[in-house]
Amino acid sequence: MSVELVVPISAIEHFAYCPRQCALIHCDGVWSDNEHTVRGTRAHRRVDSGKHRRERGQLVLRGIPLWSEVLGLSGRADAVEIAEDDAIRPVEYKAGVRHGPTADLQLCAQALCLEEMLKAEIPYGYVWYGGPRRRLRVDFTTALRNEVCGIVEEIREQLLSGQLPAAVDDERCSACQLLHHCLPQLANAPRKVRSYLKDVVFGCAT
Ligand code: SF4
C-alpha cells in the first residue's frame, strides 16, 4: 500500500456519497455551499471552537487533529470523549438526518487514527444528528474497518490519477452541493447534451 499521498478524512464521506463529488472537491479544488453545507457549518461552530470541557463526568475534547501513518490519513475529530475509565469515543456532528453509512465511515476512520495515535482500542463511537437531535452509536466492526481501508485506497488512486469519474445522475444529485458545477445531466450522454441545449439554452422542445 502506498501512503505517500495523505488522504484527508473528509474525503471519505465525499467519496462514499459520490466519487465524482470527491474528485471535484479534492482534485479540482471546487467548492460550493448549499443549504445542507451551510447548516453543517453552523452546527459545527461549537465543535470548531476547540474549547474542551467536562460534561456528565467525562472530558470532551473538541477539534482534535488526527493522523494515521499506517493508512496515510489526516484530519480532525469534531469531538473525542474520554470517560473516567479512560474509554475513548469519537463523536461526529451532522446538522441534518442520517443519509446512509457515509458518516459511519468517516467516524470509523477517525477511530482508526485515534487507535494508532493513542495505542488504544476503540470499539464504537457516535454520530450526533441535528435533525432528530439525537446521537446514534456506530460499532467499528471488522467489516466497517475494512470498508474504510478500501475506500482510502480508492481515494488515493483517484487523487494520484486526477481522473474525474462519470456523473451518477441519480437521486443524490438534487441534494449535492456541487450540482451546478457538475451538471450531471450533461456529463454522461451526448444525446442528453443535445436535449439540454434545446430545452434550456434555446427553449424549445426536443
Ligand atoms: S451532482 Fe451528482 S454526479 Fe455530480 S458530484 Fe453531485 S452527486 Fe455526484
Image: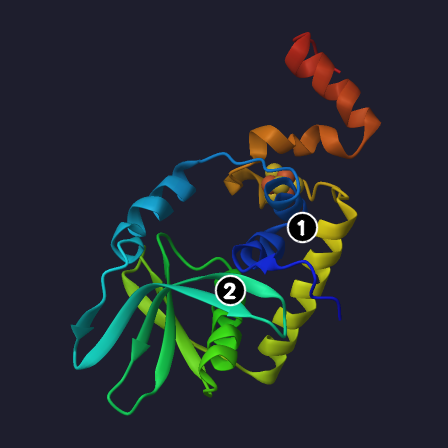
- The image position of residue 156, as x and y in percent, is 70, 58
* Residue at the spot 69% in from the left edge and 9% down from the top edge: 204
In the depicted structure, whether residue 181 falls above or below residue 16 = above
* Residue at the spot 30% in from the left edge and 50% down from the top edge: 43
Estimate the spatial distance between the alpha carbons at disc 2 and disc 1, rounded to whole Å.
15 Å
Which dot marks residue 80? none
> In the image, 186: left or right of 75?
right
- Mark 2 lies on a secondary structure that is helix
Give the residue furthest to the bottom.
85
* Residue at the spot 45% in from the left edge and 35% down from the top edge: 33
> In the image, 174: left or right of 60?
right
Query: 10 Å neighbourhood of mark 1: few (<14), some, or many (≥20)?
Result: many
| Quarter of the figure with residue 5 | bottom right
Which residue is more in the foreground, 53 or 126? 53
Does mark 1's beta carbon lie closer than 8 Å to ligand 1?
A: yes
Which quadrant does the C terminus fall into? top right
- The image position of residue 192, as x and y in percent, is 77, 26
| Quarter of the figure with residue 186 | top right
Q: What residue type is labelled 2?
A: Gln
Report which residue position mark 2 lands on.
106
Q: What residue type is labelled 1?
A: Pro
Look at the image and tell me whether residue 170 can be seen: no
- The image position of residue 122, as x and y in percent, is 45, 84
Report which residue position mark 1 lands on.
19
Disc nearer the start of the sequence (2/1):
1
* Residue at the spot 54% in from the left edge and 67% down from the top edge: 105
